[in-house]
Amino acid sequence: MSYIVKIKEISEKILKNCTVEMVIGFRKGTVPLMNEPCFARTPDQVDQFVWDGNCGINLANYLADRKEKIGIVAKGCDSRNIVTHILENKIKREQLDIIGVPCLGMIDKRRIAQDFADEIIAVEEDNGKVTVKGHEREKVYDKSAVLQENCAICVHRNPVIHDELVAEPVAEQVEVDRYEDVRRIEAMAPDEKWAHFEEMLAPCIRCYACRNACPLCYCPTCFVDEHRPQWVNKGQDPVDVRTFHFLRAYHCAGRCTDCGACERVCPVGIPVRQFTKKLEKDARELFDWEAGLTLDKRPVLDFYKPNDPDEFIK
């Protein structure tokens, strides 16, 4: 039985039983490689649901401060963000019916678009192969070769919290070097780092797509929109661009699950995960902490312990 058959079966059941008021899943997008969120409130609307490697949006983004009973389709990173939402009192566990999906990774739409020398009109996925069709050509890719970077190095592919699983858990990846790129930047001299980040952020158009797609960015008023005081101006001044990206990353410290939503939506392809991965690495090395793995412990920056390491404070 395929994932989508089981997703639909469970969704129809919990809607018919009135266990939930709606189920959040995915439907086919208006353009290839980009499925979109779908809110099914009646059993017949479940027919719209799809599941494949183009479901990269983090659906936990749609849970904050909801009051309904909600069913939600959750892959590994989504489930970890759900844990964070529960810990941060953005939603209650008893409001949720979590349909867990063991994940084999999401397709990097940007990588395929750059390689495929034609307009993409259709994409099909089957048995680890991704077939891309254009007006004049067709090309088959190994899915493993066109995964999003965060998926290629993911070590938590199975949902950490769920009410029902749509399939048996998949094997987790082991001996994956998650921080090779972070160590490379850490090894740079200060001037070299500064030049690296200036070049990296130069294309930013301050559209805030990364913020809007992030399930952690749920502040009623973002600091970039605050006027009294005004922390950053609205233009393209390089200082303001850097301030936005640096502060947003720090707001995600100890909370980010590396779901890749920020990079997936960036219209100019900025690898903003470099910031959040550095902070993820620090949280692991300094506090032995990974976000969203358990409901039984408070996030590392949620509380203070007298024996917290402080050797890094200079």
Image (cartoon, rainbow, N blue to C red):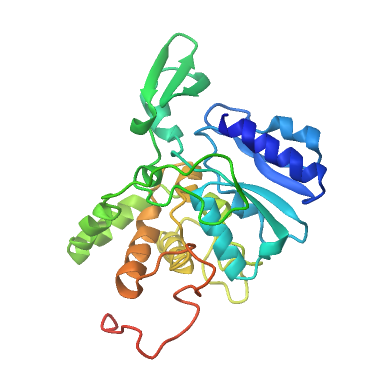
Give the percent coordinates (x, y) of residue 249: 44, 63
Query: Disc count in the image?
Result: 0
Identify the residue at horizontal 55%, vertical 56% (top origin): 161
Identify the residue at horizontal 59%, vertical 70% (top origin): 88
Give the percent coordinates (x, y) of residue 312: 27, 80
Looking at this rendering, what residue extends furthest in the bottom direction?
306
Q: Quadrant of residue 211?
A: bottom right
Give the percent coordinates (x, y) of residue 34: 55, 33
Q: Is residue 279 above or below residue 145?
A: below
159 to the left or right of 305: right
Q: Nearer the viewer, residue 165 or 297?
A: 165
The quarter of the picture where the C terminus appears is: bottom left
Q: Is residue 69 visible?
A: yes
267 to the left or right of 230: left
Q: Quadrant of residue 310?
A: bottom left
Q: Is residue 215 above or below residue 298?
A: above
Identify the residue at horizontal 56%, vertical 62% (top origin): 83
The quarter of the picture where the N terminus appears is: top right
Q: Quadrant of residue 221?
A: bottom right
Q: Nearer the viewer, residue 313 or 80?
A: 80
24 to the left or right of 291: right
Q: Nearer the viewer, residue 204 or 279?
A: 279
Q: Is residue 206 visible?
A: no
131 to the left or right of 61: left
Identify the residue at horizontal 47%, vertical 51% (top origin): 259
Give the percent coordinates (x, y) of residue 163: 63, 52
